[in-house]
Amino acid sequence: MPKEPRPREKQKNKNTGDTVTRNIVIGMVALVVLSGLIFTVIDKRSSSEVALPTTIESIDSSKNGAPLVGKVLPENDYGVSFNEENSFRIDIWEDFQCPYCKFFETEMNQYLESLVRENQAKVVYHMASFLGQESVRAANAVNCAVSEGRFIEFHRALYEVQAAENSGIFSNKNLIEIGKRLGITNPEFESCVNDLKSAETVTNVAQSMKKNGVEGTPTVFINGKQWNRTSSEFKLEEFKAAVEAAKP
């Protein structure tokens, strides 16, 4: 049996109720959007007043060595290489947001820098970016520092200031400030950071991980052979011994 049509008055009341509900929803959405715009404006106005993290404030150029200009070449899978002519090679795969990479660098960075500066090895740094947008920004920024001769110092500084993943420490503003504190004053560096001018290189490095059998960071190859530590800790003497044993 077909249903009887509803009285017109009841239908009218229903339409009125729907209209009121719809207006309330529209009003709430508008309020949320407006609130977002207000907070965005406030954030933009106050961003210049936000204090720098103390870790960044402590960075200065006093530990800088002589400038070292690395090379970014496709034959090295777009890693940053030093001592290109040396036949003894060390490849280091890292992500600036990886806490284990910080453990590795805290223990090994001075030794690795000595290998570079004394031309004891061709050292290639492959900066991965699989932990989020801040990894991309950091990898882009360190590539921007290559032409300034400050990759080594910038690389070290980023691990010194490392914080929780995607917590804001590797914002473009902070990355530019780190560069300034390391003595990088070239305006092209700032535009390189802000405009992600090295983004294609960052992508190329990321895409080359699988080809090289890199499944995580840090991963280190000494003359093509992967170095595997014998304990959960990164021990300098163990790493040095592996390097020395592999030298031709």
Image (spheres, helix red, strand yellow):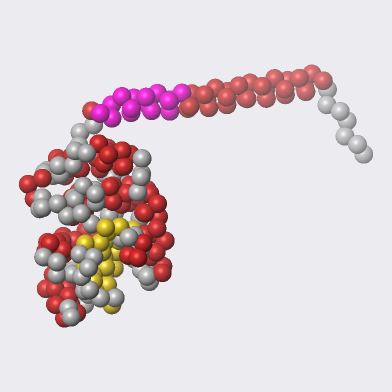
- Residue 22: x and y, percent? 63, 25
Q: Which residues are magenta?
A: 34-48
Image height of 142 relative to 185, above or below: below
Q: Is residue 65 visible?
A: yes
Which quadrant holds the N terminus? top right
Which of the pair 110/103 is nearer the observer? 110
The residue depicted at 19 percent of the width and 38 percent of the height is 185
What secondary structure prevails in the magenta region? Answer: helix
Which of the pair 248/134 is nearer the observer? 248
Which quadrant holds the C terminus? bottom left
Residue sitting at the far left: 62
Q: Is residue 127 magenta?
A: no
Image height of 103 relative to 170, above or below: below
Q: Which picture quadrant has residue 125?
A: bottom left
Residue sitting at the far right: 1
- Residue 225: x and y, percent? 28, 77
